[in-house]
Image (cartoon, helix red, strand yellow):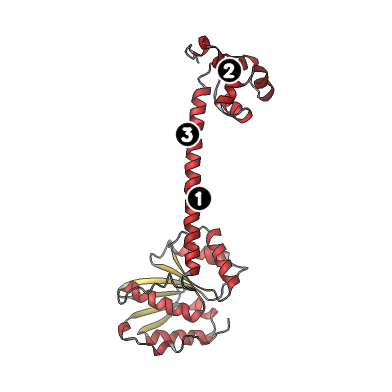
Amino acid sequence: MAYQKSSYGDPTAQNTSHFANSGVCMMSSTWRDEQHPSFINFISSFLGANSFRLNFVRIAPDLIFNCGGLSVSFIFVTNWNCNNIEPVFGRVKKLKEQFAHLYVVVSLPTRDQNDSFVRSYFKYDMDLGRPTFVPVQDIEMGLEKIVKIAHSRGGTIVLYEAHLSFYSGSLLNTIYTAACKQRDALSKMKAERKRSVQRMDIFLEVITSIPSIDNHDAYALNQAIGSIEAIAKASKEYILENTDLSADKAEAIVRFFRDPKFYLNPKIN
């Protein structure tokens, strides 16, 4: 991809007094070869200004920072392709199981790419914060966030809130809000499913207490007629017309709900 000059001025000119003796940055040689040479030169200068020594090695993540004795790994997506998203999330799911401190920095300069990212985040069932995604406006900002996260995890400075800052936090706030709504919806679905199971258990317990009626018959009655109340009101003819139950079983059901002498007798299996 074409390298564009940063709109934030010369990053190497920033005050780096609190970054002294930062550590080592290992860059994937494969990832390096996919980037524009001028961007790699920019990275080298930026890291040097922040006291990081840059090494090119064969590693699975794109970047690994060793800072303060802690290794922090990064996937750095510099070109979000809306038409080829699956490889990105497949790689994220694989590496998050291998690296405890993994961040995914994604450059999203256009609104279409932003929208694509948000849709894909939920499509591929990402767990919020595992790993942390850091959307940024451009690749220069992405590199700045990466270095600040590496420093913060190494304990040399306070976390710069890299995972919350993008378009004043609006995109990740949207993701967080949507994730919470999705989680609430799933919780409600699970609760409703649990209540449905409980209701079915009660239904089966009542209906199979009728002599000669088994689980298969109970499910058939539930599908064809519905609730216990509806079954209790159903006639023998209606039961025969709408289920595969025999005449004897239909008679037993009608008598069970309408003849006290019948339903007070113990069931004999």
- Residue 185 is tagged as 1
Give the quadrant of the N terminus.
bottom right
Between residue 256 and residue 126, name the one nearer to us: 256
The location of residue 40, given as percent across then percent down, is 49, 84
* Spatial CA span between label 3 and label 2: 22 Å
Q: Which residue is mark 3?
A: 198
The location of residue 249, given as percent across then percent down, is 60, 17
Quadrant of the image occupied by residue 101: bottom left
Of the residues shown, which amino acid type is indicated by label 2?
A: Ile
Q: Kindly state the secondary structure of the residue where label 1 is placed.
A: helix
The location of residue 219, given as percent across then percent down, is 58, 28
Q: Residue at x 49, y 69 (%)?
A: 170
* Whether residue 85 is situated above or below residue 41 in the rendered picture: above
Mark 3 and mark 1 lie on one chain; the one further toward the N terminus is 1
* Spatial CA span between label 3 and label 1: 20 Å
Mark 3 and mark 2 lie on one chain; the one further toward the N terminus is 3
Q: Is residue 157 left or right of residue 169?
A: left
* Spatial CA span between label 1 and label 2: 39 Å
Q: Which residue is mark 2?
A: 253
Q: Kindly state the secondary structure of the residue where label 2 is placed.
A: helix
Mark 1 is surrounded, within 10 Å at the Cα level, by few (under 14), some (14 to 19) or many (20 or more) other residues, namely few
Q: Residue at x 46, y 88 (%)?
A: 9
Of the residues shown, which amino acid type is indicated by label 3?
A: Gln
Mark 1 and mark 2 lie on one chain; the one further toward the N terminus is 1
The location of residue 187, given as percent across then percent down, is 47, 48
